[in-house]
Image: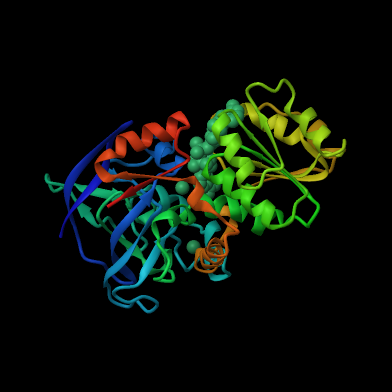
Amino acid sequence: MKIKAAVAVEKGRLEIQELELGAPRMGEVLVKVVACGICHTDTSTLNLVVPSPLPMVLGHEGVGIVEQVGPGVQSLREGDHVILSFPSCGNCPQCQTGRPYACETSSELFFNGIYQAGGTRIKNGRGQDVGSLFGQGGFADHCIVSERSAVKVDPEVDMKPLCSLACGAQTGAGAVLNLMQPKPGDSVVVFGCGAVGMSAIMAAKLCGCSAVIGVDAVPSRLALAKECGATHVINGKECPDIAAEVLGITGGKGANFALESSGAAVLVKPMLMSLGKEGRAVVVSFVGGSVDMDLTMLFVGSCRSLQGTVEGAANPQVFIPRLVEFYKQGLFPVDKLANYYSFDQIDQAFADSASGKTIKPILVF
Ligand SMILES: NC(=O)c1ccc[n+]([C@@H]2O[C@H](COP(=O)([O-])OP(=O)(O)OC[C@H]3O[C@@H](n4cnc5c(N)ncnc54)[C@H](O)[C@@H]3O)[C@@H](O)[C@H]2O)c1
Ligand SMILES: [Zn+2]
Ligand SMILES: [Zn+2]
């Protein structure tokens, strides 16, 4: 079938093109895309920070309606409402034990434009193969995904505000709820209040943390961080010593947990130094650059630890429905992060994300 899609044609350049989408293969479904969020990882892929073969249809935070099921699909039917999350193989030891975020083949399935069942599903007007980011390519009116990455949701809920549950919000909330697991009264400091960081703040509030500290450089984001549950905010560009500020807020102890979701290498050391004894830091961002660290000074005496993660260590088939329930109860207000754009406003949507004006741009089809 013919589709309209936003294709990364070369580094930094997106083009809306008419393409030919094939049929869903074994275990796959064809989805009519209702809306798709823009995540910072789309920008990183477009700029080849993550090297990916082009041309490729970007977009990995789609929501939509199943239009056709391929052979062997068991969990979905035509008409189901779905949130389209990340792909995984289903066969490796991690997938077999419910940890698809650590799938052996995640790098290939995320960034090589190909599907688990093999190959690409799209061709352009010149007969050239076109990849689909995250085995999805959600910047299109239709896409094909594996049933493993399509999470069925309550058809009564308006799906458009929920795009970020597919990646950004899942990652931030998952970093807190799945990895940190703070106890009521604990403290969490979040570096970078984009969609990921803001979702981590909402999750930290849900856990009953006593201090939830947001660090960003955009004043409107700091204000929204407070609305989302931050008890304190710090302007990282103006504050001369962020770690000292966090120590002050936490009564001299330092934070129990810290999240790096800014992508700014310069914030990594202040983040580690904000942690107290046995403090744990989680990195989710693609930190742009290397960090020179004295490991003994930062980790040994303080018993701190540092962990990286993909997609907030979430199993989307289990975690996304939990987040939808929190959203319905008003406990996880991701709709506060969204601004809506028509598909032909995609360049504006990317520009507003880069300038800090919009936290979660959502393209509506
Ligand atoms: N590991 C994963 O699975 C995963 C999933 C989703 C996103 N990501 C990555 O997580 C990061 C965050 O994603 P996002 O969509 O929330 O991005 P975003 O660009 O919306 O948010 C980043 C925030 O950090 C702030 N920031 C940047 N530099 C700063 C500085 N020097 N001082 C203070 N604040 C600063 C920005 O103002 C912005 O609000 C990105 O690197 C993205 O690629 C990773
Ligand atoms: Zn993403
Ligand atoms: Zn796997």
Pick whichever, 224 or 255, lies toward us.
224
The answer, for residue 55, to whether it is visible in the render is no
Q: Is residue 269 left or right of residue 149?
A: right
Position of residue 327 measured from the top left corner of the image (x, y, whole percent): 54, 61
Look at 55% across and 67% down and name the residue there: 325
Q: In this rendering, is residue 223 above or below 82? A: above
**Residue 251 picture quarter:** top right
Look at 30% across and 73% down and name the residue there: 79
Look at 72% across and 20% down and name the residue there: 240
Pick whichever, 210 or 22, lies toward us.
210
Look at 78% across and 49% down and name the residue there: 210
Position of residue 57 measured from the top left corner of the image (x, y, whole percent): 29, 47
Position of residue 243 measured from the top left corner of the image (x, y, whole percent): 76, 30
**Residue 343 picture quarter:** top left
Question: Most extreme residue toward the left, as rendered?
Answer: 126
Q: In this rendering, is residue 5 above or below 221? A: below
Picture quarter with the N terminus: bottom left
Position of residue 196 measured from the top left corner of the image (x, y, whole percent): 55, 45
Pick whichever, 60 or 227, lies toward us.
227
All told, the count of numbered labels is: 0
Which color scheme does this rendered protein use?
Answer: rainbow
The answer, for residue 285, to whether it is visible in the render is yes
Q: Is residue 133 left or right of residue 242?
A: left
Pick whichever, 241 or 104, lies toward us.
241
Q: In this rendering, is residue 124 above or below 24? A: above
Q: In this rendering, is residue 347 above or below 71? A: above
